[in-house]
Image: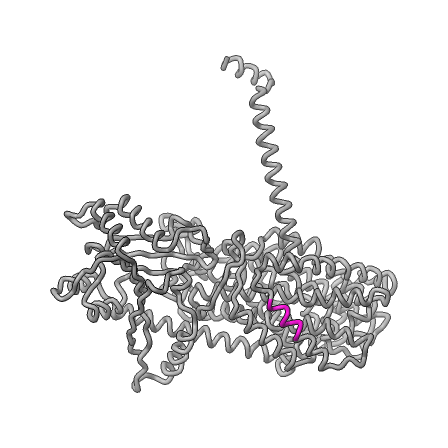
Amino acid sequence: MDLEMNASSHNGAIPADLSLSDTILDSNRHANKNGAVWKDVLLAYKSLGVVFGGLVTSPLYVYPSMNLSSPTEADYLGIYSIMFWTLTMIGVVKYVCIVLNADDHGEGGTLALYSLLCRHADIGILSSRNANTRVRNGQSNLNPRKQGKLEKFLERSIFARRMLLFIAVLGMCMLIGDGILTPAISVLSAIDGIRVPFPTFGKVAVEALSAAILIALFLPQKFGTSRVSFMFAPIMASWTFTTPMIGIYSILRYYPQIFKAVSPHYIVSFFLRNGRLGWQLLGGTVLCITGAEAMFADLGHFNRRSIQIAFLFTIYPSLILTYAGQTAYLIKNLNDFGDGFYKFVPKPVYWPMFVIATLAAIVASQSLISASFSVIKQAVVLDYFPRVKVVHTSQDKEGQVYSPEINYILMFLCVAVVLGFGDGKDIGNAFGIVVILVMFITTILMTLVMIIVWRTRLLFVGLYFVAFFILEGTYVSAVVTKFVEGGWLPFAVSIVLAFIMFGWYYGRQKKFEYEMTNKVTLECLSSLLSRPDVQRVPGLCIFYTNIQDGLTPILGHYIHNMKSLHKVTIFTTLRYLLVAKVAPNERIIFRRLGIKGIYGCVIQYGYADLRNPEDDDFVTQVTCSLRNHLESNYEGQLEGCSVQQEILQLEEAKSVGVVHVRGKTRFYIGKDSGWSDKVLLGFYEFLHSNCRSALPALEIPLLESLEIGMLYKA
């Protein structure tokens, strides 16, 4: 039979069962592919309500933010040409085609780029966070790759590494500043449209109504990105498809040849004609790309393909047509730039567009609010920011998070900006600085990723860096001139955030250094336990320590005062790596410490790891992992103590009771301490006493928790 089948196959006949199986496999692959495509399309639709709100509503405030003086037709053509090529170069080429591919396990933002670099080169700062982060994602010590000159320089220069961390932190701080300014300028610009038909509607009333709407915007954030995007997506879809329709109408009615401005020579003639004034106007045109940074920062809430689909097929053409329509109207109405959006809307559809614009402006704020939650969460788990409550709002998308403290701080600051500034031009000046600096920082970090991680040819790296360094550098030089006129605000916010992060980082480093200097060695622990006045009491103790090479000084303090230690004690280190996710088989790592009933444990988390409510409780996970380790690993096993005896001892200890012991340490700042220690460590103690504890995040019952106080000498 086999010979007949082989012969028939050689003669060109295909076996019926083989043909059928191939057909079934092909149809399954086709169905899976179609299912993935439709899933991406659905996510792209949802992303309209979260990711692109700030970008697609920028026509509300771009022209009003410009300080134009007697503009001409040629000026408007030059401005439109600048906006067209800015959207094309930064939106399409930079973000969609390049930056979105530099995700860190689905997460985006400047901190994600920084962690990606740290995983491929030893350039991290926090010692407790750097170890073993390079042996992931296919990079192994068995096959070390050749280091480049730049990588070697960054690894050897502590100044360069600190500057790199500073740049990443500054990008994060600026993004949060963006999260404050986007809601303020979007809502204020939309509500200001009510003054066109009703000039008597005062400025104070506009500010008050805007503040009330902002408060209403922040309240539903607790329901999560998925529900918020489901509510907001229809609004943004309405805006995205109606504004270009009005743009097309305006083009046909006022200036059909508007697209001749696509030619770059209009940009050159614009600057030759206007000189310094044209350069200053870049501070307004840069707002056309505002919100593009959210495409990358919000990546964890969706996925790369869905964001690319949404931008290329809806957002980009919508903006090009809307700005073309606005410009066409302004060419025939040269002095209407102060209200360049509402006046180009035809009167019959004014009120429907006002309602859509107001709702869209509210939704527009969501992109940077969600991004702020994401970057704060990344900073918290990387130990660069004081612990705040972070709630995962989706069981399917680990990147969808919410922080109540950050939410209400953003709400307060947004309302304060609206009531304090009131003028959209001043907010626009501040906004422009934030937008372009985040993009400029992304360009720098992305260049390093291309060299160190992707190993891109230097020719292509040079083309990328030079092109965007010149483009964004020109914008930066223009917007910094607006520093006094509102531009100081994002710098003030960034300085405050950076001081918080630096104070926290400084305190954590000092604490780590003290613990490493005064750590308890295994020999010292064995000596302490051999003392006649120290007893081994029944029960299981999970003793938390921040260091792995030795044991925390709090252990000696504990044994010296309590004169006891539990029969089974697990010294546990919670470790957050510079990776988005940790594989389940690498989550909990055990080792015997050479003393009966004493084990070392490292529990590893990535900054995007999600705890599943259906998982076993924390103690069960730890004890099950220890049991598996004891059964499969005999390294360090004591003589005269079998594996069965160890497991039996573990089960008995667990049945008696479990206690979680952690240290509550404070710095003792004496008179001989330097002024920098007094300021920074005093600030760290203030932050530490007001931030959330690390243990409740593990859902440990409070009745099983024991805190041991100890003073560390600064």
- Magenta residues, as a range? 212-219
Residue 231 percent coordinates (x, y): 66, 59
- For the C terminus, the image quarter is bottom left
Q: Residue at x 32, y 77 (%)?
A: 667
Q: Which quadrant holds residue 287?
A: bottom right
Count of numbered marks = 0
Q: Main secondary structure of the magenta part?
A: helix
Residue that protrudes farthest toward the right in the picture: 253
Left or right side of 702 for 429: right
Residue 182 seen from this side: no
Q: Is residue 350 left or right of residue 382?
A: right
Q: Is residue 128 above or below residue 281?
A: above
Q: Closest to the observer: 307 or 230?
A: 230
Residue 419 drawn at (x, y percent): 65, 80
Residue 680 lies, in percent from the top left, at 40, 79
Left or right for 661, reference 562: right
